[in-house]
Structure formats: C-alpha cells, structure tokens
Image (cartoon, grey):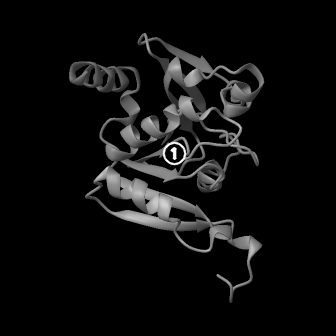
Amino acid sequence: NKLFKIRNSIQELIEFPFISGKNIVAIGGGFSAGKSAFINSIIGEEILPTDTRPTTSIPTYISKAEETKIYTLNNYGSKAEIDIEGVQAISHMFYEKYSMSFAHIINNIVLQSKTMEYDKISFLDTPGYTKSDKLKKEDNTDETIARKHLANADYLLWVIDIEKGTIPQQDIEFISKLNFNKPIFFIFNKADKKIQSDI
C-alpha cells in the first residue's frame, strides 16, 4: 500500500509538473460549506462546480498558467484534457442520478487557470468529509479521500458555513485526527447572510 501511494505521488508529479515546488494550500470542510465557491472567488473564474447540493467529489488542484486548461489523472496513470462542462459533470449530482461515482476512477483534477494570481501556490479543493443524507453512508469514500489529501498539504484553510454559528464539534474531531502540525486558518463563509453584529 505504501508503494502504491508513493507511485501515485510520483505519477502526479510526472503528469502535472506545474504543481511541483509549489506550496499546496488545501481547502477543507464539510459538505456544502462553500469551498468551491470560495476558490472560484479567489481565482476570479466560475470553474469549480457550486450548488446547494454537494458537488466536488474529486480532489482538484488549481495553479497559475498562461491559459486555462483542465486535466484529469485516472487510476491507470492516464491523463486527459477535459472542458468546464466535464468538470461540472464529475460531481455528486452524477452520483445521485446514476448511483456511480467518478472518485473510484479519477484520482485528481488539475486546473491551470490564467486568472489565478499566485505563482508559488497551488490550491487544493477537497471533497467534503461529511456525507450527504442523499448518498449511501456505507459508500463514504469522500472522508478517506479528503483525509489523505489534507494531511499532505503545506497549509490548511478550513471553511465553515457561517450559519453553523461556530466550529462544529464534528469538524474539530476530524481536524484533530489529521494530526496536522502546520498552520490552519479558519474561514467563516457566506458572511453576506449575516449582519455584522451577528458575525
């Protein structure tokens, strides 16, 4: 298992050399905390799928580039270029309709964005670690995928829906189990829904 993990990491660097040497800033949080919308606001492009339902199911790296391109890397080491519609299709909405997830087939999505401002950073959008009631509890691979990718990041931005009012205990327990010994920044998202005194 360790060798497979090492092989996968090397494969990612071979296929996507533009993330090599960058600080990986992972975006974590529960389902529908607004992680993808937060990243879209930073890069200035509505590329990552956002919805009132859970969307991101595959870890997605976002890096600066001369032109916007999107690639996938599957479990067999094959790289393919896809378009924005492809990114929108690879989501939990597909799972809801067909009871099949791309997370078992596709390891990563890499988005090279021309509107991304930061040369030394690659953002990593991860699946929400909590399972939606609409999805099968026994099929919760998203928690495992999120844990694996978050633990290896250089920094962690943890996004919380401001409607929660505080950091949920479930989030605290998940973060504690990561044993993340690097900086963690907490972001209360969707603050436009509250007046300043409530915030």
Q: Name the residue type under label 1.
A: Tyr
The answer to whether any part of residue 64 appears in the image is no
Front-lying residue, 11 or 196: 196
Front-lying residue, 117 or 51: 51
Front-lying residue, 18 or 143: 143
| Count of numbered labels shown in the rendering | 1
Q: Position of residue 130 (x, y in %)?
A: 55, 47
Q: Position of residue 17 (x, y in %)?
A: 36, 28
Density class for disc 1 (Cα within 10 Å; few <14, some 14-19, many ≥20) is many
Q: Position of residue 147 (x, y in %)?
A: 40, 42
Q: Is residue 9 left or right of residue 127?
A: left
Secondary structure, mark 1, is: loop
Circle 1 residue: 129
Residue under the image location 77 percent in, 24 percent down: 97
Q: Is residue 139 above or below residue 125?
A: above
Q: Position of residue 50 (x, y in %)?
A: 71, 45
Q: Is residue 155 left or right of residue 54?
A: left
Residue under the image location 43 percent in, 62 percent down: 172
Q: Is residue 169 left or right of residue 135?
A: left
Quarter of the picture containing the C terminus is bottom right
Q: Quadrant of residue 194?
A: bottom right
